[in-house]
Amino acid sequence: MRPMSFGQQGGPPSQWDPWKPHSQQPWTDDGNGGTPDWAALAEASESRNRKKRLLLIGGGAFATLAIGTAVAMAVVSAGDDKRADKPTSELPASASLPGGGTAPSFAPTSAAPPLDPKEFIASKAKDTAPLSAELLFPGTQLTMGSTVYKKGATADAKDCSAASQGTLPTALRANGCTSLMRATYVKDGAAVTVGVAVFDTEAQAAKAKAQSDKKGFVKPLAGSGVKDFCVSALCRTTINSVGRYAYFTIAGFTDGKDVTTKDTQVFSIGDDLAEFTFRQINRRGEAQASAAANR
C-alpha cells in the first residue's frame, strides 16, 4: 500500500495556514516516512509574524486617523460657536459684546433760552431804554425801498391830550397814556405826521387802539421846512399798536387840498411811515433783549 498523501487530489499540496480550520500541514512524502518539512514550517511561521506586524501597524494607523478626525471635529465644533448665522437667542447679551453696553450719557446743557424781544416792549418794567422822538426817528431823512422822505419837525409831549384831537384824547387818557411822540416827513407836496403814544402795559395800548375811531387823530406837526397841512382839509389816518405802544398817522397835501381814494401818493407816505414805526419799536425790543442776554 502506498503512503497516503495529505495534499489535494490532482493538484499541488495546499499551504498550511494555522488560522484556517482544517488546513493541511506541509508534510512531505519524500520516502523518509513523512518527516516534517522544517524549512516550510519556518517560512510559514515567519509569514505569520509578518501578518501580525502588519495588523498592528494598520491598527495603529487607523487609531491615529480616528484620533486626528476626532480632533478635527472638535475644532470645527468649537468654531461653530462663533458662526455669524448663530441664532439670536444664543448670542451673548449686548452688554458683553465688544463695544456693546449702554450708550454714553451726557449731562443736559444749562444754556438759558433766548430772550424774547416782545417781552421788552410789552411792559414798562422791562422797557427801560431811553426813549424820545429823536431816538425813535433818527436822522434827517428816511428811505423806504427806493423812496426817500425828508424829515421835518419832531416833538415830545407828556400831556397826550395836547398832541391829539377829536375823540383820541379821551381814549388816550382813559388808558393811562404817559407821553406822545411825533415826527413829520414830506415828499413832493405830501406830508405825514406819525404819533406814538406810550403806555405802561401792552393791554393798555391795545385797549386805546380799540377805543379810537376815525374821528380821533394826532395833531399834524408842521415846521422845519414843512407847511401846515390837514388843518381843514380831508386827510387820511391810520391806527395800530405793538407792545405797549399805540401809533397813529395823519397824511395829506401841504397845499391844503382834500385827499381822495385816487391819491396813492398820500396813501404810500402814510403806509411807509406806519411800517417804519412798527419796525423801530420792534428793533427797540431786539436791542434790549440782546443787551440783557450779554450781561
Image (cartoon, rainbow, N blue to C red):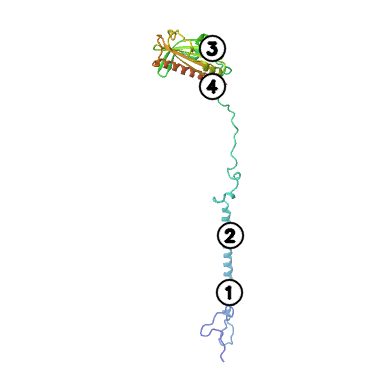
Q: Are marks 4 and 1 in contact (CB under 8 Å)?
A: no
Q: For marks 4 and 1, give the CA distance.
A: 116 Å
Q: Amino acid at mark 1?
A: Arg
Q: Amino acid at mark 2?
A: Ala
The residue drawn where x is 58% and y is 62% is 66
Q: What SS does tag 1 mark? A: helix
| Mark found first going from the N terminus, 2 or 4 | 2
| Mark found first going from the N terminus, 4 or 1 | 1
* Towards the viewer: 8 or 241: 241
Within-10-Å neighbours for mark 4: few <14, some 14–19, many 20+: many
The dot on residue 70 is: 2
Where does label 1 land, which residue?
Answer: 48
Q: Amino acid at mark 4?
A: Lys
Q: For marks 1 and 3, give the CA distance.
A: 142 Å
Within-10-Å neighbours for mark 1: few <14, some 14–19, many 20+: some
The residue drawn where x is 54% and y is 17% is 207
Residue 222 position, x and y percent, is: 45, 8
Furthest residue toward bottom: 1
- Horizontal side of residue 84 vs 141, given as left or right: right
The dot on residue 118 is: 4
